[in-house]
Image: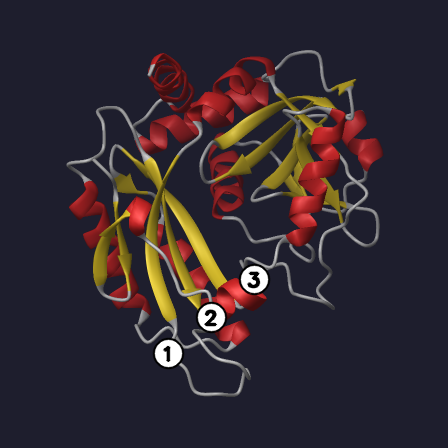
């Protein structure tokens, strides 16, 4: 059975969902979105994700035609409609996508195209990385600066991320790019934030050149609960190469240990002790062992 996608008030099977080619989101990248995920079929921190979505809409001056509360209700309805499709032990990502609509001039009155999508989580990719650590590569392509498009806006104008991904996979087909900002500081991964651990302190970039990630927020909250000191500061590649631990964080995998950076070993143990603490705390918070679920779902997917 196919997951059902909600588009402009109608449900359609995921493999049939589409928007017109005249849509400004397709033609110009005039579109914002936000993505959350489920644990045991329940959406994690949906309200925070939607608040961020509506901030992006406010910034881009797109009127979705539905209120934040209505979008929340619609999202929960989509989840309920798809519960019968979800396999035992499985979870998925759920994304609200809002384009400005179909039209030429940006000043022309038009109706937004609004959709709520469900996408599978790539457990097959993440499973070995939980065991051995991901390889991150710093590409030459940089993050957008706030003088171009504020990185706090979650949008699909992402050709720089595509180029960064290509450059990283030139080094290692399985690598994850971690971009620098225009000042040469580490900013973010494609679709995720980045942390290092140095001398017991959990460090991440300030929000001047990154998306204000909900996973990032969750980790900072968990660290506070665990008594792990944190710092939001400028981080250079030098700091990464000399870090005791490093990890990526994002909606689908939550927290992914890093084993190598630009083919240099990071730390002496992968995952490191603080990474393990945070993974255990997050798993307890959501009632799902994140690593076990990833490994079990990967086994199912590899045998299918």
Residue 155 left/right relative to 284: right
Residue 169 left/right relative to 55: right
Mark 2 and mark 1 in contact? Answer it, CB < 8 Å: no
Viewer-side label of 2, 1: 2
- Give the distance between the C-alpha atoms of the residues marked 2 and 1, in whole angstroms: 13 Å
Mark 2 nearby-residue class (10 Å; few <14, some 14–19, many ≥20): few
Label located before the other in sequence (3 or 2): 2
Q: Nearer the viewer, residue 260 or 285?
A: 260
The residue depicted at 44 percent of the width and 75 percent of the height is: 102
Measured as percent of width and height from the top left, residue 224 is found at 51, 38
- Give the distance between the C-alpha atoms of the residues marked 3 and 2, in whole angstroms: 23 Å
- Image mark for residue 22: 2
Above or below residue 161? Residue 144 is below
The residue depicted at 20 percent of the width and 42 percent of the height is: 82
Above or below residue 63? Residue 88 is above
Q: Nearer the viewer, residue 264 or 81?
A: 81
């Amino acid at each position: 059975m196919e997951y059902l996608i909600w588009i402009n008030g109608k449900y359609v099977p995921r493999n049939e969902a589409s928007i017109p080619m005249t849509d400004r989101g397709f033609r110009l990248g005039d579109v914002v979105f936000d993505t959350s995920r489920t644990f045991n079929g329940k959406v994690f921190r949906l309200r925070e994700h939607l608040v961020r979505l509506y901030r992006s809409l406010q910034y881009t001056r797109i009127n979705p035609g539905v209120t934040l509360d209505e979008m929340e209700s619609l999202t929960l309805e989509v989840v309920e409609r798809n519960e019968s499709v979800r396999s035992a032990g499985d979870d998925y990502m759920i994304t609200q996508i809002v384009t400005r609509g179909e039209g030429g001039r940006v000043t022309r009155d038009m109706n937004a195209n609004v959709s709520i999508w469900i996408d599978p989580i790539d457990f097959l990719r993440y499973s070995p990385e939980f065991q051995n650590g991901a390889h991150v590569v710093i590409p030459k392509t940089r993050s957008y600066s706030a003088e171009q498009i504020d990185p706090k806006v979650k949008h699909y104008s992402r050709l720089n991320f595509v180029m960064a991904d290509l450059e990283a996979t030139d080094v290692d087909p399985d690598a994850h790019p971690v971009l620098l900002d225009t000042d040469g500081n580490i900013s973010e991964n494609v679709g995720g934030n980045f942390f290092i651990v140095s001398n017991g302190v959990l460090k991440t970039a300030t929000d001047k050149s990154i998306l204000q990630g909900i996973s990032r927020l969750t980790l900072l909250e968990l660290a506070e609960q665990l008594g792990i000191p944190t710092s939001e500061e400028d981080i250079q590649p030098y700091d990464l190469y000399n870090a005791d631990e490093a990890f990526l964080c994002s909606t689908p995998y939550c927290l992914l240990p890093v084993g190598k950076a630009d083919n240099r070993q990071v730390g002496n143990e992968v995952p490191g002790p603080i990474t393990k603490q945070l993974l255990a705390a997050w798993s307890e918070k959501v009632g799902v062992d994140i690593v076990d679920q990833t490994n079990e779902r990967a086994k199912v997917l590899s045998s299918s």
